[in-house]
């Protein structure tokens, strides 16, 4: 049986179809989800890919992952930059947490230069488009095999 990984996506990522493709790439969210699922299965994971615009829903998913000791890959989207509530929930996790971004926030507007999540993440991968998720899955496989 494949190891489970929860792949959480924050606000506005469900609307990649209408966001700036020069920043976020050409995949809509359904295509991104399919890409993540197929990459996960290549790496031996069963990915449960979710998206929400609601901070409260993301927090409840993190609680669920903490209780089930499931590893998490998260793109907190704009919550990255200011949600202490998501950070506190992510801190409860018992398995690795990898922060991902499609774009490279450090190369963008100043308000994106702060991540309140990075400090409690196992690591962060940003700037590689959809491939950021594939790289995160590969890093997770490496960490869990140790
Ligand atoms: C993002 C970067 C964030 O700054 C932004 O608010 C997003 C997406 C990314 O994947 O590049 O919504 O997390």
Image: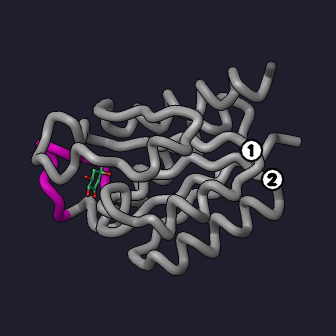
Q: Residue sitting at 28 percent across and 67 percent down?
A: 15
Circle 2 sits in a helix, a strand or a loop, which is it?
A: loop
Residue 43 location (% of width, % of height): 67, 29
Report which residue position mark 1 lands on.
95
Location of residue 144 by image quarter:
top right
Residues at badges 1 and 2 in contact (C-beta under 8 Å)? yes
* Residue 131 located left or right of residue 36: left
Vertically, is 81 above or below 43?
below
| Label 1 to label 2: alpha-carbon separation | 6 Å
Q: How crowded is mark 1: few (under 14 residues within 10 Å), some or many (20 or more)?
A: some
Q: Nearer the viewer, residue 2 or 137?
A: 137
Q: Residue at x 63, y 75 (%)?
A: 60
Q: Residue 62 carries which label?
A: none
Counting residues from the N terminus, which is met first, the one under dot 1 or under dot 2?
Answer: 2
Task: Look at the image and tell me whether residue 41 can be seen.
Answer: yes
Q: Where is residue 80 in the image (x, y as percent from the top left)?
A: 37, 56
The residue to which callout 2 is attached is 69
Q: Which residue is drawn at 63% across and 69% down?
A: 61
**Residue furthest to the right:** 1
Give the residues drawn in magenta, as a range.
18-28
Decide if residue 25 is in sight here. Answer: no
Quarter of the figure that contains the N terminus? top right
């Amino acid at each position: 049986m494949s190891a489970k990984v929860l792949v959480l996506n924050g606000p506005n990522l469900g609307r990649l179809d209408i966001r700036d493709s020069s920043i976020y790439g050409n995949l809509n969210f359904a295509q991104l989800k399919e890409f993540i699922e197929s990459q996960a299965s290549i790496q031996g994971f069963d990915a449960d890919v979710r998206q929400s615009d609601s901070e409260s829903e993301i927090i409840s998913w993190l609680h669920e992952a903490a209780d089930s000791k499931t590893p998490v890959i998260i793109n907190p989207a704009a919550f990255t930059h200011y949600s202490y509530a998501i950070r506190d929930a992510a801190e409860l996790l018992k398995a690795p947490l990898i922060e991902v971004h499609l774009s490279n926030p450090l190369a963008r507007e100043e308000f994106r230069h702060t991540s309140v999540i990075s400090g409690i993440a196992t690591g962060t991968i940003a700037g590689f488009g959809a491939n950021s998720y594939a790289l995160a899955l590969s890093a997770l496989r490496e960490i869990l095999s140790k």
